[in-house]
Image (cartoon, rainbow, N blue to C red):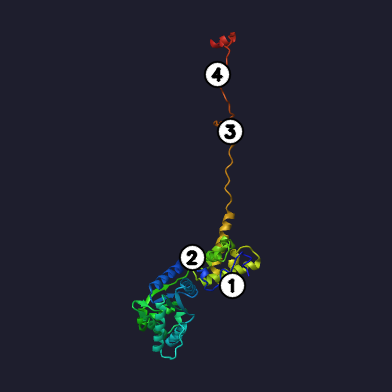
Amino acid sequence: MYTNHFGLTRLPFENVPDPAFFFDQGDHARIRTRITDSLKAGRGLIVVTGPIGSGKTTISQKIISDFSSTIKLIWMAEPPANSLDLFLFIAQGLGLKPQVSERVFILRDIKEALLKINSEGSKCLLIIDESHLMGDDTLNGLRLLNNLEEGAIKLIQMLLLGQEELMKTVNKPEMEPFKQRIAALEIMGKMGPDRIREYILHRIRTAGGQPSIFSDTGLEALVVAFGPGNTPRVINLLCNKSLNLTFEKGKPAVDLDDIYEAAGEMGMQKEVFHYKMTLRRNEIKKQAIPPIEKAPIREAEAMQTSSGKEPAAAGIGHMDIQPETFQPVQTKPAISSPVSGAIEKGL
């Protein structure tokens, strides 16, 4: 495994609902808070829907961890086929051994057991995963359970987790009585780019690692690979595959090429390819632009810079003339001669 290679204490991107890796931001944080408030307030029926792999089960495990000392938990990994199976399963979870198979009598025994739990200051929480697979009869059974009350207190609280198809069933006209009993409905979406980056770093730190196991371009390529967003399950798969590839190559950190290769194996290479080409084009542009050189300083300008004086006109040397040393040129008078006198007289 790659844990020792990257200095990790555990695998960071396993697709198991481990509360230790719960990402307490975005939709996950919001829904956890609202479920917690609903449970504390004693609201009966809570529904959470979202795409496959969005983290619904992980949220439920975090809720169980939060309330482990104050609730009696009944967990169903998948829904029962009908309301009778539902009641029998709950009865067994409460330690009952029903002697009859009539729903009305089983429901009576369930209520007595719930009253005992409530009198002891505890609560009962029923969690059903994959709730989108439930039929109308099972949903009507949940409606009957929701009617079990002691004054204003719900004797059993129910958390249903399912894909978006669950709401198609709930919205049918004949399911209106059930729909009206939903105390809280939460819808999970996909993680956006900013959350994806934070999510990846969160899981690395939780596993005892450093963010540097992904290079800057490697981390950015991971985010780019998911386009406008994706689910934690798919994010975990790509991260895990990238780390494995890098480990097999003996490299110290996951880079862009590793992400590109891993994304290709998952059929997600398109966005990473565009990102890779963009980086390449930018690099080519940088190499094509020559460095800006300063124009050579003219000799005259250099002279001015060094002496602080104005340069001479082009082609003329500079003369430093001092007024006090300047002497006018003395000229001798013209010499008189006969010839010159004759010329003056016009001869």
Q: Which residue is the site of mark 2?
A: 195
Does 97 sit above or below residue 72?
below
Q: Given the image, on which type of amino acid does mark 1 rest? A: Glu
**Residue 258 in the figure: left or right of residue 143:** right
**Residue 242 in the figure: left or right of residue 128:** right
Q: CA distance from mark 4 to mark 3?
A: 26 Å
Mark 1 or 3: the one toward you: 1
Q: CA distance from mark 2 to mark 4?
A: 85 Å
Q: Residue 135's x, y, as percent? A: 43, 84
Q: Which residue is the site of mark 4?
A: 324
Q: CA distance from mark 4 to mark 1?
A: 94 Å
Q: Secondary structure at mark 2?
A: helix
Toward which corner of the image does residue 153 lie, by quadrant? bottom left
Q: Residue at x 58, y 37 (%)?
A: 298
Q: CA distance from mark 1 to mark 2?
A: 24 Å
Residue 306 seen in the current view: yes
Q: Residues within 10 Å of mark 3 (few under 14, many from 20)?
A: few
Q: Given the image, on which type of amino acid does mark 2 rest? A: Arg
Toward which corner of the image does residue 154 lie, by quadrant? bottom left
Label whose residue precedes the other's in the sequence (1 or 3): 1
Q: Given the image, on which type of amino acid does mark 4 rest? A: Glu
Q: Are marks 4 and 1 in contact (CB under 8 Å)?
A: no
Q: Residues within 10 Å of mark 1 (few under 14, many from 20)?
A: few
The disc label shown at residue 265, or none: 1
